[in-house]
């Protein structure tokens, strides 16, 4: 086990972390470090990690980057922009804030966006009520590792009654550095009736000819949605297949707030994405959607956990994806309805297309209901393309390959079309279609 | 245009078609009637090219070529069109996008230039008008959430856009009320000309009041047991199919 060496390394690097003089923050880090040394990293005997073996990952050495990455220009990363004139983009390279690549042209009266390290240095009191209050380091070792090494990430605060129209782009880039550990830490706060779209985007530069390089991204995001706030959170995870990506997102939802999450995973070697929403006041709603596209020997594991802790809350889940070659995907969707959460309404669906007979999909719904007046449903399908649909398309003149592409595109499109912003949707569809090698079929007739 | 000779087809080793002979010429409308289980849908599916049907004997020539060895998409590009009895719903695949790809696949095969967006838009509007298809349906996914009548109308709409040389309507009338039936029939009649042919497969006579056939065939137990003019359909309506099976 490399648990001990890793935590020892943490002690060594901790002198470089921001806010050494902030007592409460040091306390948070030390507690997390202690949790990590005591509990270690999860292994396959843990029910939640049954299908995902992280042992090979633990046998490698990872460390936080201690140098800023300079010399990158806008044009090097332009292909990852949501549009060429992004209003607001915050960029991190190998875990460190890259001001020269970021853009803050938004209306400053609407929201405040700063890199977390700067907030820690200048106004740590802003963070104290929220940071590490939602995500629980005891949940698993990666969460503890991130918390023990809180250094940089996103701080976003959207002010009361403000509706931010343009998406806020948070871009985490990695360059090929063997043994690189990146621990993004994101805090998103929406005041009463605030609305925003945040795109949390993970990508790698120089995908090819990297030889034997291995990297680990260990991200933790925390979100607080106040009364009537509305957040659309899109996570795009398209890192290289040399990168392992383990992330968790904890969301606290107050009365009548609305949270939409869409996690699009197309990259990475071993990917684990947890999302935990707590509906703590009545009328809160969440939609957790996911799209996974895996091939070769990619392994992806998605855990959702929705806590209905107050009456009359609604949750919806639509996770779907396409698996090819020897890839393996896990979906574990847990819904927990507390005793007093009457009139809860929870729906969950998970659908997977298998393009090869060597893939494996494990789909596990978990409904725990302790209230009696609730409406809960779940359904899962795993299968090949529908023969009747293929035949129908062919009978109208489409060749089998085009017919297959239509069906795959239609299948993934059903989750993508839920995005409200049409420009953003088209941009993301482009990436997804490229990933599925569908970009050569005609675009112009697409609505 | 179509010449079916002694066609014998089985499904999972069970003989369904037991020697069909049928010749359809350009400009003709044929009706094939028959009771449930007589082989009507099998015939339609075999002509469409659906998997799961074994040809035991006989041949089908379409404009002089062996139809049964052509893949389904080639049949479509050669001008064959089947209006299905139960059109499948295809979530996520946009109607306009699909129809455009289908039309252009056919035009490309025929060596014609593909339609551009403006030409295509005009054709779609014209044909939607012809079959009185609600244009809102065109913005949706193929057949998804369509009513039974809307699905049938969509088949005729696709037929109108694709302009087939040979169209086979497989029980297009089933499940339609009389108003919808008239609209579908008007659409089909508007597409009739001297160069194309239509085969109407139906259980009931009533569709044939609106799409008047030149020749009516009665299919029973995998064979065509009687052929005649349109009065044969009326006779069947009066006497039922039992009359034929007994004779």
Image (cartoon, rainbow, N blue to C red):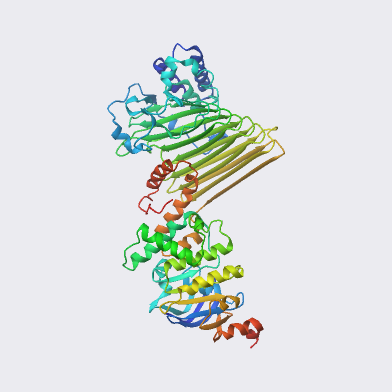
Q: Nearer the viewer, residue A310 or A67?
A: A310
Task: Confirm whether residue A355 shows in the render.
Answer: no
Which residue in the rendered view is the most extreme toward the bottom? B247
Left or right relative to B241: residue A32: left
Above or below — where is A371 with respect to A295? above
Q: Tell me which residue sits at (53%, 63%) in the image.
A: B87
Question: Number of labelled discs?
Answer: 0
Above or below — where is B233 with respect to A234? below
- The part of the image, by quadrant, that contains residue A395 is bottom left
Q: Tell me which residue sits at (56%, 41%) in the image.
A: A317
Residue A230 position within the rendered picture, expressed as x and y whole percent measured from the top left: 53, 33
Q: Nearer the viewer, residue A2 or A305?
A: A305
Left or right relative to A309: residue A395: left
Residue A109 position within the rendered picture, expressed as x and y whole percent measured from the top left: 45, 24
- The part of the image, by quadrant, that contains residue A314 is top right
Left or right relative to A252: residue A356: left
Q: Tell me which residue sits at (33%, 64%) in the image.
A: B108
Task: Confirm whether residue A263 shows in the render.
Answer: yes
Residue A91 position within the rendered picture, expressed as x and y whole percent measured from the top left: 37, 29
Residue A368 position within the rendered picture, expressed as x and y whole percent measured from the top left: 65, 37
Q: In which quarter of the image is the C terminus of chain B?
A: bottom right
Q: In which quarter of the image is the N terminus of chain B?
A: bottom left
Above or below — where is B109 with respect to A198? below
Which residue in the rendered view is the most extreme toward the left? A71
């Amino acid at each position: 086990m490399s648990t001990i060496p890793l935590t020892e390394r943490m002690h060594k690097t901790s002198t470089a972390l921001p806010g050494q003089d902030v007592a409460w923050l040091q306390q948070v880090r030390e507690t997390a470090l202690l949790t990590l040394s005591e509990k270690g990293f999860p292994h396959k005997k843990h029910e939640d990690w049954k299908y995902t073996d992280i042992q090979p990952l633990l046998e490698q050495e990872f460390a936080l980057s201690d140098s800023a990455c300079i010399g990158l220009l806008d044009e090097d990363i332009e292909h990852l922009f949501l549009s060429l004139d992004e209003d607001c983009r915050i960029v991190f390279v190998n875990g460190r804030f890259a001001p020269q690549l970021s853009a803050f042209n938004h209306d400053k009266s609407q929201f405040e966006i700063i890199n977390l390290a700067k907030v820690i240095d200048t106004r740590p009191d802003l963070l104290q009520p929220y940071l590490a209050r939602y995500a629980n380091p005891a949940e698993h070792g990666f969460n503890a590792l991130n918390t023990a090494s809180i250094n940089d990430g996103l701080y976003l605060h959207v002010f009361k009654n403000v509706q931010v129209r343009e998406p806020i782009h948070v871009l985490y880039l990695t360059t090929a550095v063997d043994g690189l550990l990146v621990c993004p830490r994101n805090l998103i706060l929406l005041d009463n009736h605030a609305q925003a779209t945040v795109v949390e985007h993970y990508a790698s530069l120089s995908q090819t000819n990297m030889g034997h390089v291995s990297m680990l991204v260990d991200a933790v995001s925390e979100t607080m949605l106040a009364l009537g706030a509305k957040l659309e959170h899109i996570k795009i995870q398209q890192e290289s297949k040399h990168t392992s990506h383990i992330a968790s997102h904890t969301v606290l939802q107050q009365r009548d707030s609305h949270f939409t999450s869409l996690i699009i995973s197309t990259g990475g070697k071993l990917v684990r994405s947890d999302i935990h929403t707590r509906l703590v006041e009545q009328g809160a709603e969440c939609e957790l959607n996911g799209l996974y596209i895996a091939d070769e020997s990619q392994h992806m594991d998605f855990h959702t956990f929705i806590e209905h802790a107050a009456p009359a809350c609604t949750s919806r889940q639509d996770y779907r994806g396409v698996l090819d070659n020897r890839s393996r995907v896990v979906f574990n969707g847990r819904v927990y309805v507390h005793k007093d959460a009457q009139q809860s309404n929870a729906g969950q669906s998970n659908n997977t297309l298998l393009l090869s007979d060597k893939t494996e999909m494990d789909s596990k719904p978990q409904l725990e209901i302790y209230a009696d007046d609730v409406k809960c449903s779940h359904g899962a399908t795993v299968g090949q393309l529908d023969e009747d649909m293929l035949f129908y398309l062919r009978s109208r003149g489409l060749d089998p390959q085009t017919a297959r592409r239509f069906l795959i595109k239609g299948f993934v499109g059903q989750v993508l079309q839920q995005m409200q912003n049409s420009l953003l949707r088209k941009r993301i569809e482009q990436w997804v279609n490229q990933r599925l090698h569908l970009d050569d079929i005609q675009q112009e007739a697409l609505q | 245009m179509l010449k079916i000779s002694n066609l014998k087809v089985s499904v999972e080793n069970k003989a369904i078609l037991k020697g069909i002979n049928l010749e359809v010429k350009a400009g003709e409308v044929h009706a094939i009637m028959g009771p449930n289980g007589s082989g009507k849908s099998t015939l339609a599916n075999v002509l469409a090219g659906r998997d799961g049907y074994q040809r035991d004997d006989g041949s089908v020539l379409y404009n002089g070529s062996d139809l049964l060895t052509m893949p389904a998409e080639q049949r479509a590009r050669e001008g064959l069109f089947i209006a299905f009895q139960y059109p499948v719903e295809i979530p996520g695949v946009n109607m306009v996008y699909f129809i455009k790809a289908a039309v252009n696949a056919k035009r490309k095969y025929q060596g014609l230039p593909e339609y551009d967006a403006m030409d295509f838009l005009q054709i779609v509007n014209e044909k939607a008008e012809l079959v009185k298809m609600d244009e809102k349906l065109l913005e949706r996914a193929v057949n998804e959430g369509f009513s039974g009548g809307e699905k049938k109308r969509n088949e005729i709409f696709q037929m109108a856009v694709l302009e087939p040389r040979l169209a086979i309507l497989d029980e297009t009338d089933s499940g339609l009320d009389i108003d919808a039936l008239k609209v579908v029939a008007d659409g089909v009649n508007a597409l009739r000309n001297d160069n194309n042919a239509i085969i109407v497969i139906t259980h009931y006579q009533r569709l044939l009041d609106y799409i008047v056939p030149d020749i009516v065939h009665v299919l029973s137990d995998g064979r065509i047991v009687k052929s005649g003019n349109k009065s044969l359909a009326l006779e069947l309506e009066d006497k039922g199919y039992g009359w034929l099976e007994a004779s």
